[in-house]
Image (cartoon, rainbow, N blue to C red):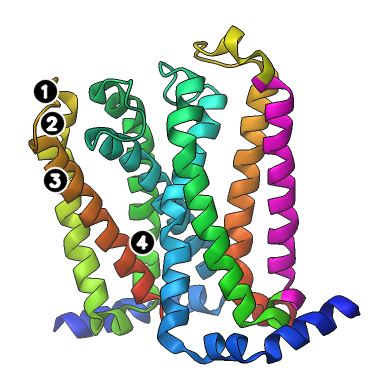
Amino acid sequence: MPLLEFFEWLAATSTSAALRESHYLYLVILATHVLTLTVFLGTAIIVDLRLLGLVMTRVPVSQILSQLVPWTTGGFVIMAASGSLMFYASPTDRFVNLFFRAKMAMLVLAGLAVWMFFRTAHRSIDGWDNDPVPPMAARLAGGLTLLLWIAILVAGRMIPYQQYWFG
Amino acid sequence: MTLLEFFHRLEYLPLLVAMRSSPWLFPAIATVHLLGLAIIGGAVLVVDLRLLGLGLRRQPVARLARQTETLLFVGIALMLLTGPWLFMCFATKYYYLTAFWVKLVCFVLVLLFTLTVRRRVVMGSRTAGAAPKLVAAASLSLWFTVALGGRLIGFP
């Protein structure tokens, strides 16, 4: 498999090996990844629950998108960067890890769900911006991304248990 | 019985021994604990960022606080329901971890601070001056220490 060969080559590079063997640097990256979850997932949950009409119902959705979502995006960028470094430290282990593969697949799905929201429900936001409970298309997008973020959290937390589950 | 002996007894209760031998129970509870952290993070950030003049600046602080209060309590409830199990699983290991004791003290402090001083400030109408910013800084620092302590406890 060419992809696996590429990751084997990547794992053999000196920076990948250095990162893998640098105990403290790796732990700092891992701690950054987990702690940024409070910013990314914390605000993403609020955005999704607002789209479902369950929290902050008196705050217009457009204000949440323009003033809270930049924090969500910033958190995501830090998580993606620290996550990429952890992948770079052990590419072949991650590549064969089923929890990691599920997490990546669901990240793509979550990206599609966000894209779908901006292509559909968001186009008519002026008509429902102040509604405590947004229309069905917006609720669907909020509910779907919320479920995906939680499933991604579960898959991520399970990555170290690959050996335990699949031998 | 010393505290360490008590922790040892907790760790070897039949229920906890069974929990440790399960391939999914500990990670499942740890995942819910992490979800609780994210929920608290969101509910706290929305209000504290606003106190610092960031985030949802066009909304009154009191409204944001009221509208995220349930979420904050859900997050804290998830923590309280899951944390003790994670602790009891490895109680004697935690006894020797400074990070665990620091986390515990900061968690109690931030709960008391959130329910008293911070609550009075965010539910009130005066949001000008340095006091609200100091409250937000104290709240964020304490929660950050709790979260960091939690992460350090899990390191090998």
**Mark 4 / mark 1, whichever is N-terminal:** 4
Whether pointer 3 and pointer 4 mark residues with C-beta atoms closer than 8 Å, the reply is: no
Pointer 3 and pointer 1 on the same chain: yes
Figure quadrant of the N terminus of chain B:
bottom left
Determine the chain carrying the residue at label 1.
Answer: B
- Label 4: element kind: helix
Task: Decide which of A52, B92 is in the foreground and name it.
Answer: A52
- Label 3: element kind: helix
Task: Name the mark nearer the viewer: 3 or 1.
Answer: 1
**Mark 2 / mark 1, whichever is N-terminal:** 2
Mark 2 and mark 4: span between their CA atoms? 29 Å
Task: Decide which of B54, A90 is in the foreground and name it.
Answer: B54
Q: Which residue is mark 4?
A: B83
Q: Hey, what amino acid is under mark 4?
A: Gly
Q: Which residue is mark 1?
A: B126
Residue range corresponding to the magenta coloring: A95-122
Residue B19 locus on image (x, y percent): 50, 73
Q: Which residue is mark 2?
A: B121
Residue A143 lies in what quarter of the image?
top right
Mark 4 and mark 1: span between their CA atoms? 36 Å
Residue A31 locus on image (x, y percent): 42, 69
Q: Is residue A117 magenta?
A: yes
- Left or right of B142? Residue A118 is right
